[in-house]
Amino acid sequence: MTTPISDYALLADLHTGPLVSRAGSIDWLCLPRFDSDAVFTALLGTPDDGRWLIAPRRGEVVDRWYEEGTFVLRTRWRTPTGEAETVEFMPASDGRADLVREIRCITGEVTVDVDLRFRPAYGAATPWVRKVRAHGQQCLMAIAGPDAYVLRGPHLEPDGARHGGAFALSAGQSLTWVLTWTPSHAEPPAPIDVDAALESTREYWHDWSDRVTTQGPWAEAVHRSLLVLRALTHADTGGIVAAPTTSLPEEAGGERNWDYRFCWLRDSALTLQALLVHGRTRGALHWRNWLLRAVAGDPEDLQIMYGVAGERSLPERTLDHLVGYADSRPVRIGNGAVEQFQADVVGEVMIALAELRDAGIDEDAFSWPLQRNMLTYVTTHADRKDQGLWEMRGDPHHFTHSRVMMWAGLDRGIRAISEHGLAGPLEEWTRMRDELRDEILTRGVNSVTGGFTQTYDNTEADASLLQIPQTGFVAYDDPRMLATVAHIERDLMRDGLLLRYRTTAGTDGVAGDEHPFLACSFWLVEQYAKTGRMDEAVSLMERLVGCASPLGLLAEEYDPVSGQLMGNFPQAFSHLTLVRAADALAAATR
């Protein structure tokens, strides 16, 4: 039976993001990076594709929570004979890849079952597993190709291609296992001091989260969302992944299954904006430095996404040996959208960098020339059709949202010159910006309804149009925006939440359907708040926050019929738009 996405918890060390189910099974683990091959892939297959279960026999979860302001996960279990508690975490940003799991008997007696199945290469490889002695301790070591996994803790017995055991605990007794990744050619690293690692991990997260400024009725949801955005940021490179998973489907049994373990310029730029508003300037600067390295060079080589360290080659392929989450195939790794032209991306990046500049972060000798290069890319491709924000795999079009974002990119470049004294072709950018504005208002507005359209050559509604006033192109209460909102509400609302667009319109080139996209509904909250529709804004916000998992995590989409989260999880886009919506509500209330 497929485990609901909302039953998974995220663990985080700022390098990768394993998922542990409510039943105590780590069903997804990529080491040492977000985009490394998974060693536990049961999330997209079966337990035989790799998992690590630690759970009290006949146990029932009675409570599950993160220690406040951290990703230290605690789970309280009740069994017919006693109670137990697990503590699970990854030491944060210590340069290693360790996963710690401890279980303690609180009252009575419990039997703890352990089932460990190493399956590197996304379940396609069976490793060589043997006992070794390292640093004075006996360990279990699994090797497959370049990767090795070292398990320290109570001895597990082999049983075919798995290892396991049953351990009896009485009140006050505990068991601890630590799984460590290492290159297979290297000697096993020294063991960690678990108590010290737990304390330093708490200190790291508290130091980070205590600097975050949140207030108002949505403060708890905003705080957790900002923590998620930090957890999806690679500590060394500054790259921000869209999600730590691949191929969690937008429709159960469908083919809309994509790999999100990469750094989209758009998503990262929007994350930067959310962090800036809440006082995390240093993290925003870290991302800018990643951006400079990733896109350095000829502007014609600009991509919409990169690897965690700025890798350019992200070829898409399918893993046909996996049955997929909820029988949803194909399972994909890599992302073919990396080859797409998406005309909006430079605009989102320029908006974010302008806000960084306005926050008092000076440009350096590298950052402003890079922005000029990106705007050269815009001017060179000014007339080119694109695949749009939603990465349509059908024919390219002139998407109205993309054209507005091109306008916004040029507008921020012009402001950099006029307000900050930076050098650039002011007259050329001004002329092109103004021409784009006239073009959009002529070709991107429906002459009958008066609202913006998805593309210049259709009259479809598209929730991306809700971003138009966020750029300053028109006001939130501009008649064209109000007409657009009415069109979106009429055509894209499903059970009170918004779809991105009508998949039946044939624009995206992919079979099947999808569920409401949470980010779009958060944009609608912002639109409502900015135009005085406060009752509707608050009601929708309450509904959306209620869609989160019990641990406050959001996926990409939500099925209002089944009440289940869908799509990759947790999703940066959903969390950053939650933050924007909460900020808009707070501003409107003030």
Image (cartoon, rainbow, N blue to C red):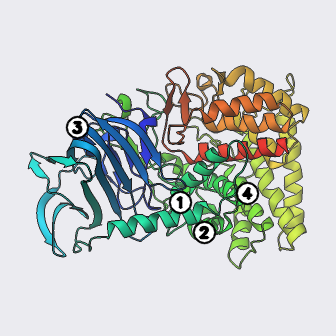
| Residue for badge 1 | 233
Q: Earlier in the sequence, mark 3 or mark 2?
A: 3
| Residue at mark 3 to residue at mark 4: CA–CA distance | 46 Å
Find the distance from the CA under tag 1 to the CA under tag 3: 36 Å
Read off the residue under disc 2. 286
- Whichever of callouts 4 and 1 sits on the residue coming sooner in the sequence is 1
* Label 2 vs label 4, nearer the camera: 4
Sequence order check: which comes first, mark 3 or mark 4? 3
Mark 3 vs mark 4: in front: 3
- Residue at image x 64%, y 43%? 389
Alpha-carbon neighbours of circle 1 within 10 Å: few (<14), some, or many (≥20)?
many
Nearer the camera: disc 3 or disc 2: 3
Q: Neighbour class for label 3 at 10 Å: few (<14), some, many (≥20)?
A: some
What is the distance, in whole Å, between disc 2 and disc 1 at their CAs?
A: 10 Å
Report the quarter where the N terminus lies: top left
Q: Circle 3 sits in a helix, a strand or a loop, which is it?
A: loop
Query: Please, what is the three-letter code of the amino acid marked with disc 4?
Result: Val
